Amino acid sequence: MVIQNKKELIEKLTGVHSSKKSYYVALKEKIDELLQIKREWEVTFSAVTDLLVFINRDYEIQRVNQSAVDFFTMPQNELIGSKCYQVFYGRQDKCSPCLADQVLSSQKTSYQQSRTRFNRVLDIFAYPAFTEDNEAYGVTYYAKDVTRLIDSIKLASMGEMSAGVAHELNSPLTAIVGNSQLLLREASPDDPHYQLIKDIHTSGIRCQRIIKNLLTFSRQEEFTFEDISLNAVVKSALELAAYQIEKSKIDLEVNLGDKIPPLSGSANGIEQIIVNLLLNARDAVEDKIRNEKSIDKGTVIITTRMHPDGKYAIVDVSDTGYGIEQEHISQIFNPFYTTKQSGKGTGLGLSVSLGIAQAHGGFIDLDTTPGQGSTFSLILPVANGKTENNNEYKPFNGGS
């Protein structure tokens, strides 16, 4: 049937003839009915507590529910049109193998479990969407966050072992550190054994720091939560780390945002994360300068800001190091995994930091470009309260 004019179009849409009712009244009723159906469908779609993401054949996200918006901490308008592999995995190219390709080619439901951005594990069920001609034109992802279940199974025995080892080592280390400290007080710097005793003391302190990380990792240490100022915690972390960065002849830039609401959390715990990220950034820049014999100083930048949705406060720690290769990204938060040279790291820093962030209801994100540098972002939920305007940073001036 070919519709010749406006009258026939309205009759086709409404099923109403002029003898029964005004065309426009009938058309308005149909539109209202369709809008009501649309609203009910959207409410149902957004009410699902797990992630729902629909993508087309070009891997572009076409629709998401509120749970997906919350999970990826991105506005809906930024998610729509983005490639699924960028949003889920932070990749610049398509996954291999690709779950969407598998579903579109087989036209059957498929499943996979994978570790995505923010080091979260998702159970992903993929369903093909068909046209009236029974052709697959897209894929719906239904994803459930099972990180806690997987990690609890995986880390239970490791955490128990770590706690046991840490407690066993604490007693002899306390004796080593204490006795070496007494010997240092009695020895003169000119004593031929002075440097040896100092090395013993320094190594003992380092071992105690590793044990503290082990205890944190095994969840034997609990945090006391209170309202804290993020900028104040950053300043405190800089008092510990700034000198170590600057003495390595690396430029340090500090950009503290204003009007950041208080956080509910542990100042010591968050400070530990920031110090870890700052020292990792320093190591990354140092490695690049040393390996390339570069005369450039390199830069570490720390920034505090609010997420656009107002629900999260963010600390970005950026560096001009080598960046992280794609094959390492999925493993960098695993306990005892490190890409640093032997003796430079234990592989616990990022694992412990992620655990602390998750205990605060937050997470750590990574944006990296191999050869150019990385940005680690600590993302934490804000508490209700007044905003702060305390963004003045005074550089650390101790030592030379």
Image (spheres, grey):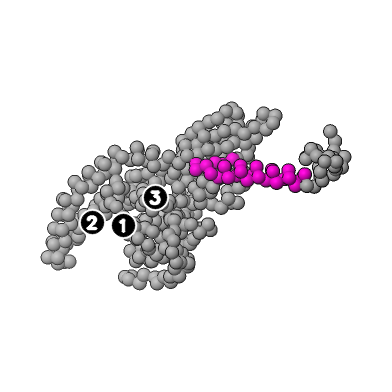
Residue interval drawn in magenta: 26-54
User: Does residue 372 appear in the picture of this structure?
Assistant: yes
Of mark 1 and mark 3, the one earlier in the sequence is 1
Kind of residue sitting beneath label 2: Ile
Per the rendering, the mark at residue 224 is: 1
* Whole-percent x, y for residue 201 in the image: 20, 58
Report the magenta stretch's main SS.
Answer: helix
What is the secondary structure assignment of the residue under circle 1?
A: loop
The residue sitting at 39% across, 50% down in the picture is 358
Residue 358: which disc?
A: 3
Q: Is residue 105 left or right of residue 271?
A: right
Mark 1 or 3: the one toward you: 1
Between discs 3 and 2, the one toward the N terminus: 2
How packed is label 2: few (under 14 Cα within 10 Å), some, or many (20 or more)?
Answer: some
Q: Is residue 218 left or right of residue 99?
A: left
Q: Position of residue 107 (x, y in %)?
A: 60, 28
Name which of mark 1 and mark 2 comes first in the sequence.
Answer: 2
